[in-house]
């Protein structure tokens, strides 16, 4: 009787212990770092996709960095099993792809895509494959290619210099300042000649009158 009672008491304890051990094993497996097994590139006529193959799906943390332009893909809780740390791939948008164990505690694998021009991205997962889709950022490219707007610099028309009339005492005049509205250069020259002749006649009359007055004084 004593033996059966002890056996009855031990059964629930063993059941609880086994359940605790199983639960601990499942938690440990789920927290184990994922393994990054391969990194590659897929290209079609519309876009380029960086393919990252892991032992299980990993939600990435993606950051765009400038100077120089690059796309940084961090894979949390992961370790790298890729032997090549640089993929020598190049097209009109990408110059190179680098992979490394960025951090060991906590474990982070980092994939860096070196960019040649502004690029937009999106990502999705297919089974254990992470695909980061890249395509040129058309809005940024259009803004950078548009020439800056500057005010147009146009030279104002130069004034026309009227030649000096032979025998005239005046200086060079500007047609834009002296010509009457609707006038022309020949008319302007004729007017200048008439004014010159009239001035000479007035001077001649003045000289004659002056000599007469002097004669009267000497008599």
Image: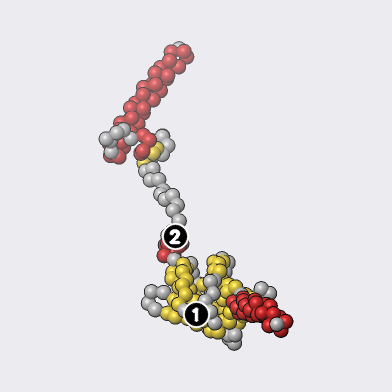
Asked which secondary structure carries label 2, the reply is helix
Seen at 46% across and 72% down, the residue is 124
Disc 2 to disc 1, how far (Cα)? Answer: 38 Å
Residue 121 is left or right of residue 79, and the answer is left
Q: Which mark is residue 143?
A: 2
Which quadrant does the C terminus fall into? Answer: top left
Seen at 46% across and 13% down, the residue is 217
Disc on the earlier residue, 2 or 1 = 1
Residue toward you, 79 or 46: 79
Q: Farthest residue toward the right?
A: 2
Judge whether residue 43 can be spotted in this image.
Answer: yes
Which quadrant does the N terminus fall into? Answer: bottom right
Question: Where is mark 1, residue-wise?
Answer: 128
Seen at 38% across and 35% down, the residue is 177
**Residue 105, position in %: x, y?**
68, 74
Residue toward you, 150 or 49: 49
**Residue 119, position in %: x, y?**
47, 68
Residue 180 is left or right of residue 155, and the answer is left
**Residue 123, position in %: x, y?**
47, 71
Q: Is residue 12 above or below residue 199?
A: below
Q: Quadrant of residue 201?
A: top left
Judge whether residue 89 can be spotted in this image.
Answer: no
**Residue 54, position in %: x, y?**
54, 81
Seen at 47% across and 81% down, the residue is 41
Q: Quadrant of residue 35?
A: bottom right
Q: Is residue 84 above or below residue 68?
A: below
Q: Quadrant of residue 163?
A: top left
Residue toward you, 76 or 154: 76
């Amino acid at each position: 009787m004593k033996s059966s009672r002890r056996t009855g008491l031990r059964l629930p304890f063993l059941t609880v212990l086994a359940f605790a051990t199983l639960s601990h094993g499942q938690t440990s497996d789920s927290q184990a770092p994922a393994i990054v097994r391969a990194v590659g590139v897929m290209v079609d006529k519309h876009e380029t996709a960086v393919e990252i193959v892991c032992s299980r799906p990993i939600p990435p943390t993606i950051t765009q960095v400038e100077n120089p332009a690059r796309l940084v893909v961090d894979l949390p809780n992961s370790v790298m099993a890729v032997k090549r740390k640089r993929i020598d791939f190049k097209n009109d948008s990408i110059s190179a792809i680098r992979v490394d164990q960025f951090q060991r505690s906590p474990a982070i694998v980092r994939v860096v895509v070196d960019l040649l021009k502004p690029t937009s991205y999106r990502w999705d997962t297919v089974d254990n494959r992470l695909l980061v889709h890249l395509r040129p950022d058309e809005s940024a490219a259009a803004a950078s290619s548009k020439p800056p707007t500057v005010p147009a610099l146009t030279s104002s028309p130069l004034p026309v210099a009227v030649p000096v009339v032979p025998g005239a005492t005046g200086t060079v005049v500007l047609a834009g300042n002296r010509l009457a509205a609707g006038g022309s250069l020949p008319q302007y020259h004729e007017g200048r000649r008439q004014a010159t002749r009239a001035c000479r006649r007035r001077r001649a009359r003045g000289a004659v009158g002056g000599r007469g007055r002097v004669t009267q004084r000497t008599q």
